[in-house]
Structure formats: structure tokens, C-alpha cells
Image: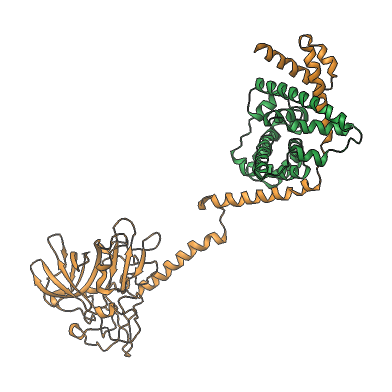
Amino acid sequence: MESRTGTDDAEAALIERARELDDAAWAAIYERHAEQVYAYIYYRLGDQHIAEDLAADVFVKAVAGIKGYRYRGTPLLAWLYRIAHNVTVDHRKSAQTRMQRTSTDALERVEEPRDELGQRDQRQDMLAAIRRLTPDQQQVVILRFYTGMSNAEVAQVIGKPEGAVKALQTRALRSLRRGLEARDPERRARA
Amino acid sequence: MSGRSSFDDALDVALDSLLAGGAAPSVSATHQEHAGELAHLLVVAAGVRDAAAAAPAPSMRLAGHARAVRLAVRDAQAGARRRRAWWRRPMTFASLSLPAGIVALAAIGAAGAAAGGAVAVSQTGVASRVERIVTLGRVGGSDAPPPVATPAGGSDRSGGAAGGPTAVRDSNGGGVASQGTPENPNAPVTITVSGVIREINGGTFTLETESATWKVNHDGTTVITDTIAEGAFATVTGTATADRNLHAARIDVAGGGSPPAGATGVVPGAAATPSPADGRPGGNPGHTPGTGNDTGTPRAGGVDGTSKPGNGNGTPPKTPADGNGNSRSNAPPGNGNGLGNGNGGGRSQTP
């Protein structure tokens, strides 16, 4: 995580400038964290363009809510991930309301190639399986495995105790195992 | 419970090693009691970690969205400026325009006050304390300016410059009291009326103006400058009610019943004439005292606040230098309704 590389003072100063609605500060924040936020949303939704659009939404919401944000040593990126989680959940709800299948099944049909190299197919299967987890489990897995956060940091982002994060992590891996094992016969039959 | 927690802890430690680059089998070997399930879950975890490579790199679309964020920042900046109190905003020329306009209006009003006054109403808008300034134009043929219109007691509450109540014109002439206040139309108002004393009856008399007749009551608290006599010209300041009763706080009598020189009588008609320059004689011959030069067409309109000494008949304007009671000011100069009506309470008539 890039926020780890900077000092707390630099982060605090950047956030203070962002609170003052400084253009340059927000440009720096976007440049620094946009791809991370995009990746987080992509892992959860699986659609590149939607993830890019929603990533921008995350920053727009961050601008609107920065006055209420207080820096307490937690990286700004953690706050952005929290917003991203809410944005993702909202998007899924609205998508379900519109009966548009932007969720996993549709994405699998569009993006899942016919096992060109085998490896890519397995990765897409894994991402599809992740998207079938509960929102909390998805959040823990993505933050833990893809953003490199420690358990304590994940706990800060999702607002739960570390013990709860560990439990979510265990349940998520078990669910993934079951899901992948269930898909193996299908894949073998398809091949 | 503790077993589950223990397994969660063991898995978490193993994951830390895995994510740090350790191999899954070796990690599971260090936790023998959970080795079986740990091994399976760590294989899954390794697959999860490797799947990160399946995420496509963002397109230029993401960079393009930086503009949307920039616009959001600008919107937020604009919103913050709107919410900021005006006294905390940076001083700009535009922000000065309103106060400058008010000062300019006050200056214009003060200039109008010098021309004397007609009818004005001063409203504080606060509770029922409303002051009105009424000058019923006295005419005449003398080009005397109209009598003084003052707020009660000569106080400066009738307006003045900064922050004073807004003065408005009152074209109602003698019917001032009927206007009341915005809050309560029947609330008493403090006014000053000039006219001729009639029908003296103990503590009451009638003050006759051209357009209205006021029943004036006075008592021991009333300040009376001279003998109240039939036919005398008087300026009465007091509290008026809608039925034209006027409880006098002060009565300025032009001594001994003699009409003031230069004041050519009560000209309530002028007070009801909105246009001061219409050439109509505002005088009432029956009440024309003094110099008899009532052929003049006074521009002293009474109501419009622009009252200038008229000379429609070619009579040169005269200054009411006679010191008659009517033209006396009860208030210090300059405290008139500066905000716009221009009558200024007749401050210019201070002898």
C-alpha cells in the first residue's frame, strides 16, 4: 500500500489540504489511489468499465464527505476502501432492482474464455467464486489478499474486531474451497 | 469456541506467511494440529492470491474520471463559499456595492431632507413601535417650506443614516393614523401634525388641517409652548390612533393665535397631493395667515417628500425666517428619514 510508504505527517498534511478542498491535494489523492480503488471494485464486480466509473464515484463521495473525516493514523486509502465497499453494495442493489445481470453469472458469460491457457480460466473462476461470497467476506478477502493489508488494518476498514476479521477470512476460504470443488466437475465435463 | 478461534488464529498466521511469500505446504507443516484443513485452505488462498493477476489494468477512462473529481472539488468549493457568512468572505468590489448603494441612498435622502418634507412614515418594523412623520404642507402663497415633520420628541428614531428604520412615503396626508403599522394596522403611531386650533374645550381641541381634522387631547404631561388659542397655528406631536385622536406630548403654538409669518395657513390639501409640482395651489385661503402671498403655488406638497419651495406663480421662494412655531424642528437636523423619502422630516426648516 502506498500510504504505508509515506510518513504519517505527510498523510495528515495531505488530508488537511484535502479538507480545505485544495485542487492539487485532490489531484494527488486521485493519482495515488485511483487504481487501487478501481482494482478493489473490479474484484468485487468483475466489470472493468463499471469499476472505473464507480472508482470515480468513490472520490466524488470522498470530496463531499472529507469535512467529516478525521485523520487518526489510519491511511486515507482505508477510508476510500470503506466508501468503495458502500458504493459497490449500492451498485449491486440498484442493479438487482433494475434486473440487470451485472453480477457474476453475466460476467462469467462475457469474460470467461474457453480455457485458452487453463491458467486464465482458473483465475476467472476464482474471481467469480469470490464474487459469490457475502459482501463482508468479499471485502475481507480482497483487502487481505489484493491490497496487502494486515488483519488489524482490515479490521479498521470494515469497522470490526480483528477476531471477527479472522473468522470472516476462515469462512471465506472455506466457501471458496467448496465453490471451486463444485465447479471442477463442470469444468472437466465442459473441457 | 476456543478451538475455532485457535483455528482462525492459526490460519491467519499461515496466511501472513503465505502472503509474505512462503509456500503453502511448509506453512501448514508448522501447525500440525490443523495441518489437514490448513493445507487445503492455503491452497485455495494461494489461488486467490494468484487471481489478482486476472484484473485488467484500468483504461484511460479512469484517468479521464479525474476531471469529474476535479469538478466535484470545484462544486464543493462553491458550496463552501455560499455557506460562509458574509462577514467572513473576502472583501471584493462586488461585496461593497450593496453597502455603497445604501450609503448613496442615505445621502440622497439627506439631500431630500434639506428640501423639506411632506409626509413620511417611518417604520421600525420592530414590534409596534412605529414612528411616522407627517408634515401637512402649510402653504401658501408664501413659498415657505412646509412645516417641520419630526418624529416624536425629536428623537432620531425616524431614520437617520445607518441602520435606521426605512422611511416610506405616506401619501395619505392627514390620514396617517389610519395606516397603522404593518404588524397592526390599528396600533398607535407617533406623529407630528400642524394645523389651526379650533373648538377648544378644556383639555381638548380640534386641529384642523386641510384634509383632516384631528381631535387633540392634552394633559399635565403635555409640553405646551404657548397659549392654546382659537385660530392659532400649532404643531402637535403625539400618539395618534386610527380615529384621528391625537394624544399630544408636545404642542408648539405659534404665539397668541397669530399665524406664523410666512406660513400661509394649513395646507392639508397639499398633503394629499402627490405631485408637488403640479401647479395647483395647495393653500387654503380660509386659513391663510401671514403675508397673504397665497397666490403662490407651493411646491410644498406635503406627501411626496420632494417639497421644494414652489414658485409656480413667479413668486420667489422665501425662507421661513419668521421663526414661527410650525416650522420649528423638534429634532436635531439631519435625523430625518434618510433612507429614501427625501422629506427628512423637514429638517431644513429649522429656523
At horizontal 31% and vertical 59% (from top left) the residue drawn is: B183
In the image shown, does A31 or B13 lie closer to the viewer? Answer: B13
In the image shown, does B276 or B322 lie closer to the viewer? Answer: B276
Q: Residue B212, how many percent across, how many down?
A: 21, 75
Quadrant of res B27: top right
Quadrant where the image shows the C terminus of chain B:
bottom left
Q: Is residue B328 visible?
A: no
The chain whose colour is green is A
Colouring chosen for the image of the structure: by chain
The chain whose colour is orange is B
At horizontal 45% and vertical 64% (from top left) the residue drawn is: B102
Quadrant of res A163: top right
Q: Residue B345, how many percent across, how many down?
A: 31, 70
Residue furthest out toward the right: A117
Q: Is residue B270 visible?
A: yes
In this image, B279 relative to B62: left or right? left
Quadrant of res B126: bottom left
Above or below, A52 relative to B269: above
Above or below, A27 relative to A181: below
Q: Residue A160, how many percent across, how many down?
A: 63, 25
Residue furthest out toward the top: B33
Quadrant where the image shows the N terminus of chain B:
top right
In this image, B335 relative to B96: left or right? left
In this image, A26 relative to B50: left or right? left
In the image shown, does B248 or A185 lie closer to the viewer? Answer: A185
Q: Residue B277, how many percent across, how many down?
A: 35, 83
In this image, A83 relative to B97: left or right? right
In the image shown, does A174 or B88 lie closer to the viewer? Answer: A174
At horizontal 29% and vertical 66% (from top left) the residue drawn is: B132
